[in-house]
Image (cartoon, rainbow, N blue to C red):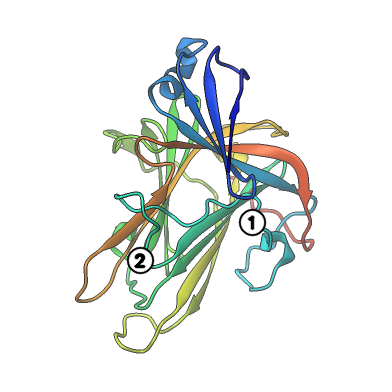
Amino acid sequence: MSLALSARRWPLVAALAIGAGSVVVFVARRAASPREATRDEHPFAELHAPRVAEPISIDAEEGKGVWASERGSTGIFKDASGAGMVPYTEAKVRWDERTLYLWLYAGDLDLEGSVTEADGPVARDDSFHVELGHEQSLYALDVSVLGTVSDAKCDGSAGGKAPIACDPSWKSGAVVAVDRDGTLNKVGDNDEEWIVEMAVPLSSIGILGAKAGTRIPFAVRRCDVGKGGPRACGSFGVGALRGEIVFDAAVERGPRVARAAQP
């Protein structure tokens, strides 16, 4: 862990590098323009995402080299007290010029899911909630242990207060696959985990011609749904410390596959 000073956009900025270099925390003390107001009000964590040389196959198969490194990892999600979430939960991100890729890992002793209708009440099942920001809009996606997706375009900012107005007619065009290690909706059978692999076309959130240096406000959270126990929640980029994906030029190599369909 190291402390460094940066003057990338602000006259006074403190930067704290964490872990292997995927996440860098900036505390802005004065914004350079009104557009930087959110950063002026909140410290934010940069999540540095490596580029992929070839599109990633969205099948949630284990052992893919493209997800092996800790580059682009949030690390363990934090709970409301700032401690690591139990059960263990983490997200990783990758990118190419047309697609944002997410790998979402959830340790889970009791897999619970029943909602199969798109844009249904996915949040009541074991699920992840992802927020992406672009040009004053918030794009929200919920994806469950069943692979069911609910998505909407909202007013607000990634990681901020719950949006007041959302348009559920917006479609992300996300391609999703889920790998589950356990039995759904059965208590006491020693479930272990579930993993979401997802590709979101960047055009669906208004980003065309992505390149190294592209930035996307980002937040992700998860609440573990269990029978007979407290609801455990954790997040990255939510609340006081906002998140932002930064596309790095460094390449993370993986298998060749078809791209996510464009909406």
Residue 58 appears at what percent x and percent y?
A: 63, 63
Crowd band around label 1 with a 10 angstrom C-alpha radius: few (<14), some (14–19), many (20+): some
Name the residue tied to disc 2.
Answer: 126
Q: Quadrant of the C terminus?
A: top right
Classify residue 155 by image quadrant.
top left
Q: Identify residue type, mark 2.
A: Asp
- Report the residue marked by disc 1: 70
Image vertical order of residue 58 relative to residue 181, above or below: above
Residue 39 screen position, x and y as percent: 45, 24
Give whichever of discs 1 and 2 has the lower sequence position. 1
Classify mark 2: residues with Cα within 10 Å, few (<14), some (14-19) or many (20+).
many
* Residue at the extreme left of the image, as rendered: 228
Q: Amino acid at mark 1?
A: Glu
Instruction: Give the side of residue 49 with respect to residue 221, left or right.
Output: right
Describe residue 44's horizontal placement relative to residue 233 as left or right.
right
Which of the two residues, 106 or 58, is positioned nearer the viewer here? 106
Do we see residue 74 in this rendering?
yes
254 left or right, relative to 107: right
- Residue 10 falls in which quadrant of the image? top right
Most foreground residue, 90 or 16: 16
Q: Is residue 119 left or right of residue 96?
A: left
| Foreground residue among 219 and 206 | 219
